[in-house]
Amino acid sequence: MRAEKLNAAHIQDGVAKLDAWTLDAVNQIIEKTWTFDSFPTAMAFFAQAGALAERLDHHPEFLSTYTRMRVRLWTHDVNGLTRLDFELAAAIDALVRTEFSARLNNTEPPCA
Ligand code: H2B
């Protein structure tokens, strides 16, 4: 079943429930950046988040810059945000919490 495009109020609500994801309201994208302790850790995150996305049949855009990984989510099918984006965002946060929390580099600001 195709997920419905969320309106602005539902998007605000969804972003508020997530941990530090930001909204690009113009382009209807949510995004978050993590900085890891090394390039191999960043690549392990890439592989595991990719496998998670494949299981959920919802696919992020990844930007890899050395130890930094940016994830952007939207639903191409509706050209906007749906509950699938928020479910995948929460699942990626859970993955980072369980598998990568000891391997984050919190001293560097997660700038773009
Ligand atoms: N991922 C994302 N991010 N947006 C989509 O609209 C989308 C997807 N559509 N993954 C899915 C796959 C769709 O093509 C299949 C048929 O479910």
Image (cartoon, rainbow, N blue to C red):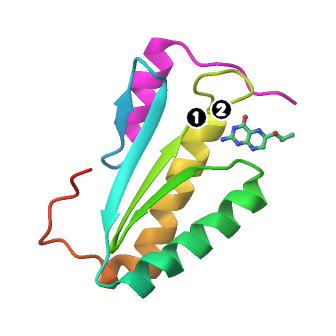
> Mark 2 sits on what residue?
75
Q: Is mark 1 within 8 Å of ligand 1?
A: yes
Q: Position of residue 83 (x, y in %)?
A: 62, 33
On the rendered image, what quadrant is the N terminus found in? Answer: top right
Q: Position of residue 112 (x, y in %)?
A: 27, 50
Q: Quadrant of residue 101?
A: bottom left
Q: Is residue 52 left or right of residue 24?
A: right
- Whether 107 is drawn above or below 71: the answer is below
In the picture as drawn, the residue positioned furthest to the front comes out as 65
Does the magenta segment cover residue 3?
yes
In the picture as drawn, the residue positioned furthest to the right comes out as 1
Q: Position of residue 66 (x, y in %)?
A: 34, 73
Numbered mark located on residue 74 in the image: 1
- Whether 104 is drawn above or below 74: the answer is below
**The residue under label 1 is which amino acid type?**
Trp
Crowdedness near tag 1: few (<14), some (14–19) or many (≥20) residues, C-alpha within 10 Å: many
Q: Quadrant of residue 96?
A: bottom left
Q: Using the rendered image of the protein, determine whether residue 18 is visible from the camera's viewpoint.
A: no
Q: Is mark 2 within 8 Å of ligand 1?
A: yes
The quadrant of the picture showing ligand 1 is: top right
Q: Position of residue 72 (x, y in %)?
A: 48, 44
Does the magenta segment cover residue 25?
no
Asked whether the residues under the numbered discs 2 and 1 touch, taking CB atoms below 8 Å apart as contact, a structural biologist would say yes
- Most foreground residue, 109 or 20: 109
